[in-house]
Image (spheres, coloured by chain):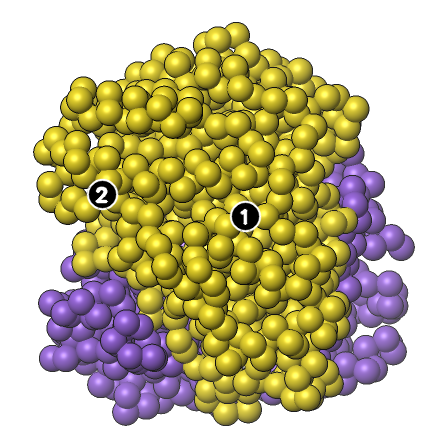
Chain colours: A yellow, B purple
Amino acid sequence: MKTDIEIAQEATLKPIGDIAKDLDLTEADWEPYGHTKAKLSNDLLHKLDNKPDGKIVLVTSINPTAAGEGKSTVTVGLGQALEKLGQKALIALREPSLGPVMGLKGGAAGGGYAQVLPMEDINLHFTGDLHAITTANNALSAIIDNHIHRGNELNIDPRRVEWKRVMDMNDRALRQIVVGLGGPLRGVPREDGFNITVASEIMAILCLATSLDNLKERLANIVIGFTYDERPVTVKDLNIEGALSLLLKDAIKPNLVQTTENTPAIIHGGPFANIAHGCNSVMATKTAAKLGDYAVTEAGFGADLGAEKFLDIKSRAGDINPSAVVIVATVRALKMHGGVHRDHLKEENIQALEAGMDNLKKHMETIDSFGLPFVVAINQFPTDTKAETDFVKSWCESHGADVALTDVYAHGGVGGIELAEKVMAIAGPAEGKPNYVYDTNEKLETKIRKIAQNVYGALDIELSPQAKKQLAYYEQEGWGNLPVCMAKTQYSLSDDPALLGRPENFTITIRELRPSIGAGFIVVLTGNMMTMPGLPEKPAALNMDVDKDGKIKGLF
Amino acid sequence: MKTDIEIAQEATLKPIGDIAKDLDLTEADWEPYGHTKAKLSNDLLHKLDNKPDGKIVLVTSINPTAAGEGKSTVTVGLGQALEKLGQKALIALREPSLGPVMGLKGGAAGGGYAQVLPMEDINLHFTGDLHAITTANNALSAIIDNHIHRGNELNIDPRRVEWKRVMDMNDRALRQIVVGLGGPLRGVPREDGFNITVASEIMAILCLATSLDNLKERLANIVIGFTYDERPVTVKDLNIEGALSLLLKDAIKPNLVQTTENTPAIIHGGPFANIAHGCNSVMATKTAAKLGDYAVTEAGFGADLGAEKFLDIKSRAGDINPSAVVIVATVRALKMHGGVHRDHLKEENIQALEAGMDNLKKHMETIDSFGLPFVVAINQFPTDTKAETDFVKSWCESHGADVALTDVYAHGGVGGIELAEKVMAIAGPAEGKPNYVYDTNEKLETKIRKIAQNVYGALDIELSPQAKKQLAYYEQEGWGNLPVCMAKTQYSLSDDPALLGRPENFTITIRELRPSIGAGFIVVLTGNMMTMPGLPEKPAALNMDVDKDGKIKGLF
């Protein structure tokens, strides 16, 4: 089969104006960025206010493994399949981060015949949203250090500046640094570090904001650190929310592109799925729902992290209510959950597959507890045997679950027809709110416990001394009624990445909390979360090139 | 009078497609970025190869002072005036850097009725060129540190990594830092620092490259540091020139915009005018010359730095040969050169003015020695008295120099008619090469001495022990035949910023050299050059804001 980039370069893209026209957009509703990308106007959502919402389909998955699940690919393919069935469908995805593109992956915009295009641009600078977020984040850092340097009127404790600088790069050497060295001309020395841009609270804010005004309000609420007497210091105290909003005035506009089959796609925002909520922007998803009969969107990692946060955080913030859920699984990943080593995934192994179904079962129960109908999508790989896919199908059917084989990577929308039909059959009306895991008015500790017990299947939570202290501080500070954003390994339902399948009799250790008051949630850290990736031994960048005409290679 | 931003927001912009059409560009020659910005295609210059060049007018100035000269404003206004005289004129300017915009200036794209628009975008993220340069620069840094971390096959000495990270921000706390702290998972500790993006060698490379291929070749030649046995290490050794070129594939395309009077402007690239050559890109200037009867462009700082480097570096690299030069002066700045304190600039002072003419005279002699005809443009300020402007006019005339009063800030092109007429009268044919200050084949030391003596008026140069050692190393390394790029204070003809007017009997101390082998020049440092600015007590950012409809304020 052809590589992703070969397929992408051979695809016939429509001018983005034609895509916009098909969506009944006027010239004032969008701005071109090149011939195949556009930004949608700030007014558009307001203008569409009275239009009824289409149905939102949330694509999630079992716990990811090294074998890969292809969640983005299924999301794109499902949108394409719905269009083939005569529906107006839009796809709403996250923007890839350049760091991992240069590092490991080489590209992240679906795959095969279910890609969003132009993949070269989407994987590189796209319309500059991530660069704008980087700039806003680092402008705030510069303002903080300048404030400390010039008298520190706010009494900021340099040891308690929680706001980190960011870069859209995999760069381990920036994880822990000391800035401000070299004497009085070079600022006040303090420990600092860079996160990757998608881990910036500003990315989470952009993705949860419902308007430019709401963005500014959220930015003003960011807590950048604490004073010497341990009082929170906000962006509002520094009076810089206006400039930060100015830097983000275009980044907040959703981006319109298309898939390999010319299905419209809105790609916008991409926060980390552990220390943030891992979903594309509220504005993008809402716009997709307003413009289509169906908006197909995804959430990061497995249903324990992505779907839970989509529903408990994003749904609440944006009044975005899925009508149906797709749980993506692969035979390969299920076999890994059943105990097969990565090197033996190509061998048929029904016994391991059966053991691995436990992981899927837990996620089915979780989606069920949210009160949402779902279809299991088995994303086929060439190495799957018929006996294996038959087994998964009949297992699902015997557990009362809708299930569909999909092969959108190799066949595009045609490979997702069965899935699309089953999604259409179960998707409820657009208005119903999910059964949230918790009420926001509950205590933070209660909310954390409910997620650990009901979504992860833990016996209980265990709080570190630091977490206990922080819980008390946050409740007292008035932050207790915010949703919680769990940062946990994506590989396991527990907080131990080695425990695949459906672990039992475990507790979740809560190490530390962090206030993301601008984003509007409290981050709950279980274990060490890496917020700045490193480059591998042989970075993908070493294989990248561009010829004299601008044709690229090495993004695959 | 209205503020710059008020004038900008009231201006009627043409759709960028209309501007392109007026330049006889086809749809394939450009890509839209919004409705009023475009990128010109990679093929365009090649396509225009056989078209004769229009005349290039280089705008330079006396040594800048705190009083301001308005060189960019005169450049824009001159282009507008030429159009009013029935000429097809294009303006070729540098892109502003966000750091100073957030810090001191609030905006940098001409002023008054001689601005390039949309000024909000040009001053913020524009078409993302600077972000792409930042990314490419920092991708190289990440690759270097990853290489050292993973076994250091090339034997790079971490103490001799000269390649710095960059950020498009005024952030003094990043001037001197330590990276790689925190143990084996966080890389190899070493001293590092951030420059502002426009100080990146990649910016200089982008501005001197003649094609995407030439860009890649120059990137490959970058020397990032030295091995433990003091051999140079290049980007080619790291095999990363392909990925860096890929990251710059769109940034290399010149940007088309328009002025307040709809005169086409190509804004592209903006390297530092001290540690780099301070001119917009070769490709932009060449394109402007191909598309117009006149291309009006500027070089950074005064003629001692900007014009010398334009002619000795950029002209050579791009075969770009000005037909005429404009030397901008203001009564205010001339009075400062004549000894008046900043606080007394509003008071008429013919005596000080007369004393200050010495500075202008030196720059006139310099342009004359390049064999180029020039006009002195007196950029009027409301506080100038008639006696003062009359004095400057008659002084110029009595010294055989063409001179014109301009008032383009207040009146747009109409205020520059006299200047435009005089420029048209003197501009020679487009083919002639200037008399360079030096032959590239001369020794580095000779080249430096010739600039110091002939352009600055120094008695001689004095080499630090380090500079002597480096000169020997560079000559031996085969770098001796490159042009030199002087890094000197812009405020004085000497290397002492306090010596205004026309200092005499001084020597220039050469402190240090740096190889910019990718850019294709040797940087010669006199004194300490700050390559990362800091924020002032009250950063301009604190006054910036954007309302709910995206309308901005605080860029002035």
Question: Quadrant of the image for the C terminus of chain A?
Answer: top left
Q: Is residue A264 visible?
A: yes
* Residue B388, image x, y percentages: 82, 70
Residue type, numbered disc 1:
Lys
Question: What residue is disc 1 on?
Answer: A309
Q: Is residue B284 visible?
A: no
Above-or-below relation of A298 to B554: above
- Camera-nearest residue between B367 and A418: A418
Q: Is residue B115 left or right of residue B181?
A: right
User: Mark 2 or mark 1, which has the lower sequence index?
Assistant: 1
Residue drawn at (47%, 70%) of the image: A462
* Residue B155, image x, y percentages: 13, 73
Question: What residue is disc 2 on?
Answer: A338
Q: Secondary structure at mark 2?
A: loop
Residue type, numbered disc 2:
Gly
Q: Is residue A460 left or right of residue A154?
A: left
Please name which of the two marks, 2 or 1, marks the residue nearer to the observer: 2
Q: Callout 1: few (<14), some (14-19), or many (20+) C-alpha neighbours within 10 Å?
A: many
What is the distance, in whole Å, between disc 2 and disc 1 at their CAs? 26 Å
